[in-house]
Image (cartoon, grey):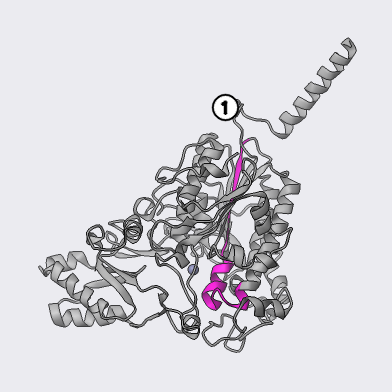
Amino acid sequence: MKRLTVSMFASFCCLLAISQKTNPKPASEEGIQRPKLVVGIVIDQMRWDYLYRFNPVFKSNGGFKRFLTEGFSCDNTLIPYTPTVTACGHTCVYTGSVPSIHGITGNNWWDNTLMRSVYCSEDKSVKGVGGKTEEDGQMSPRNMLTTSICDELRLATNFRSKVIGVALKDRGSILPAGHSANAAYWYEGRSGNFITSTYYMNELPEWVNQFNKRKLVDSLYKTGWNTALPAKVYTDYATADQKEYEAKPFGKDATGFPYDLSKFVEKDYSKISSTPHGNTLTVEMAKAAVIAEKLGKNESTDFLAVSFSSPDYIGHSFGPNSWEMADDYIRLDDELGKFFAFLDATIGKNQYTVFLTADHAVAHIPGFMKENKLPGGLFEDNGIMKNLNTQLKEKFGIDNPVVNIDNDQIYLNNPKIDSAKIDKQVLKKWIIQYVMKNAAVANCFATENIMTTPINKTLREMLANGFNPNRSGDIQIILKPGFIQGGLSGTTHGSWYPYDAHIPLLFYGWGIKKGKTNRETYMTDIAATVAALLHIQMPSGSVGKVIEEVMK
Ligand SMILES: [Zn+2]
């Protein structure tokens, strides 16, 4: 008995030694339960309804069914602000905040102090690292005014947690990973490389150089793009493959499946973004990061922020009811399934927590709506800014009082109008009357009147959440449902309507219950929920609430 106890004690010590070696928890984190790794996945442009529309073709071992059968789905998750675009979406998911607070009011916005258009992640004080030139990749998260959940994890663990962002789009990688990230990598179409900037480091790590040297893009191009499943499947899910209202990203003669991509080998590395191969490239880069950076095997919880940009490029070109979109989701499901199998093998099943959401959804192509007698159309006023300025010059005698139109907002040159002593209210009223004449416009009003204009309260709240005095416009345009600004082919997003604002929200893995809710939840709730799960502080501009149902 005594001998047994001694040997039990010895093996206990041995086990303790092993467990300390594989997961040596710092004293300051002892007793706090956390997963080894958090993987945040944002699908750039995913409508919530895809989860169920494509459900019959999703594989039993694919990514989406793993979430739906073993994880938790918040089926009624909405974006609580406008404009519903990429930069705002990624920022909101990771900060739990809204543009009025976190400052990312669009992919681009007019800065009323700098008096110029600003790109969300631009930063001329840094240099690109790994691209063709140092100008490729002058990016950082500095325009984002709050912390992200990744920053909070770093703070909570005294910066022991590793945070890495990966996406094809710079903004899909940089904004989620936050200010104190170890690295953010994004794809640069001129070189075909994943690059970063001097904000993070002065040289790419050797593993990234090795990854780039593989030129995976060329081998993916050589496989072309044909449908993954027989044609019959696609006729069940989508309109005819070739439609005149679809854009043609692979050249005017490439009108449908199969797409020959071999012509782009060594010639054009940007085209991969508009194919499902872009998702493969992203997963391969994410896997390389997990292995090389030993994510999930460090002493504190690590965070991998991945964004899949290709669905957005494909969606813009072909729309939600196309063969291309269906095929992209069939392939993405498979890709995610394999990625989770990789994480099971590398980190351990239920040792990591994953959430999946989207930065925004998307409208159907106006041509498709028209074809099916559904409401929708185009905001047709090509050169509206020029037209406005010409007429305002005649009417008020001032040159170019309108300096920008972006995110359905008209920006005025306020210093110029003030010094010309023009009655701004009269000028604004004139612009509003001009815009209201357009058949695509539902409403138009000065942004200073958001709270007093008689509009639906959901819309009012979304507009107020999107309004940042220094980075928003003076006049708000609200298009009618189904209407978009754009050309005759392709589609877009950005409005307050549910087809743009209703997104999937799925959780799976460590600490997550099985189930679903139809209760109204918001994009802003994601960061608060992750914060609660990890027992860390919520980001500095967080306005979300914990979705208690998802937590064990
Ligand atoms: Zn988009």
Q: Secondary structure at mark 1?
A: helix
For the question of whether residue 180 can be seen, the reply is no
**Does residue 400 lie above or below 488 as drawn?**
above
Please state, as top left, top right, bottom left or bottom right, where the C terminus lies in the image.
top right
Relative to 402, 327 lies left or right:
right
Residue 320 lies in the magenta-colored region:
yes
The residue under the point 41% across, 50% down is: 97
In the displayed structure, 4 sits above or below 84; it is above
Asked if the stretch drawn in magenta spans residue 511, the answer is no
Some atom of ligand 1 lies within 8 Å of the CB belonging to the residue at label 1: no
Classify the position of the N terminus by image quarter. top right
**Where residue 336 appears, x then y in whole percent?**
67, 59
Mark 1 crowd level (few <14, some 14–19, many ≥20, 10 Å Cα) = few
Q: Which residues are magenta?
A: 300-325
> Which quadrant of the figure has residue 494?
bottom left
* Quarter of image, res 225: bottom right
* Image location of residue 457, percent across then percent down: 32, 58
Placement of 290 over or under 25, stated as above or below: below
In front here: 79 or 312?
Answer: 79
Which residue corresponds to the image point at 19% horizontal and 77% vertical from the top-left? 399
State the residue position of label 1: 28
The reply to whether residue 250 is in sight is yes
Q: How many numbered marks have been drawn onto this rendered protein structure? A: 1
Question: Whole-percent x and y of residue 461?
Answer: 33, 56
Q: Quadrant of residue 385?
A: bottom left
Identity of the amino acid at label 1?
Answer: Ser
Q: Nearer the viewer, residue 518 or 11?
A: 518
125 on left or right of 329: left
Q: Residue at x 66, y 80 (%)?
A: 235
**Rendered location of residue 180, percent (x, y):** 50, 45
